[in-house]
Amino acid sequence: MIYVDTSVLLAELLAEDHAPPPALWDETLIASRLLEYETWTRLHGRRLAASHGESARSLFGRLAWIELSATVLSRALEPFPIAVRTLDALHLASIDFLRRNGQQIELASYDIRQLEAARRMGVPVSPLTPRPAG
């Protein structure tokens, strides 16, 4: 199972300078509900909700969701192997929760700090050989 963070979904939606390979979307994917909120906030902030909303909903439909439960939120309060930002802590806590419950998880992300924290936690990183955007 591959945990997708917001950087991957936004790269797909916004045709940034990198984008995940199309085959990623055929995998079994999971994300924190946080991804949905982050995505909408970014789309609204760029005034792209009308033009990109349907594509976002389509990508959301390919994901299984993990909620921000009290257990996940409590884990986010604990230290991580390196300093992380708040939202990264919530994503990493979600991954940790899944792993503690027997799931084999890889992380797909373009966030270098989050990837380093995940590696130090023993989380395998999904190779994102990017296709050129555009």
Image (spheres, rainbow, N blue to C red):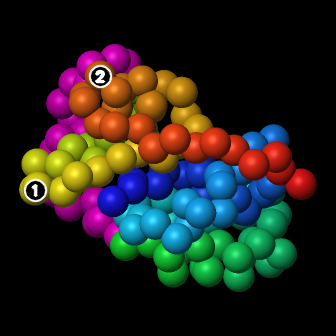
- Residue 39 appears anywhere in the view: no
Other-residue count near label 1 (Cα within 10 Å), few / some / many at <14 / 14–19 / ≥20: few
Q: Residue at x 44, y 32 (%)?
A: 114
Whether residue 73 sits left or right of residue 52 in the image: it is: left
Q: Residue at x 59, y 73 (%)?
A: 59
- Residue 59 appears anywhere in the view: yes
* Image-quadrant location for residue 54: bottom right
Q: Position of residue 30 (x, y in %)?
A: 38, 64
* Image-quadrant location for residue 29: bottom left
Q: Position of residue 5 (x, y in %)?
A: 48, 50
The region drawn magenta spans 65-83
Q: Which residue is mark 2?
A: 120
Q: Quick one: which residue is furthest to the left in this view?
A: 101
User: Mark 2 or 1 closer to N-term?
Assistant: 1
Question: Which quarter shows the N terminus?
Answer: bottom left
* Image-quadrant location for residue 46: bottom right
Q: Which residue is mark 1?
A: 101
Q: Position of residue 38 (x, y in %)?
A: 55, 56
- Assess whether residue 68 is covered by the magenta stretch: yes
User: For residue 57, which numbered disc appears in the image?
Assistant: none
> In terms of secondary structure, where does tag 1 sit?
loop
C-alpha gap between disc 2 and disc 1: 19 Å
105 w.r.t. 54: above or below: above
Question: Which quarter shows the C terminus?
Answer: bottom right
**Which three-letter amino acid code belongs to the residue tagged 2?**
Arg
Q: Residue at x 18, y 41 (%)?
A: 75
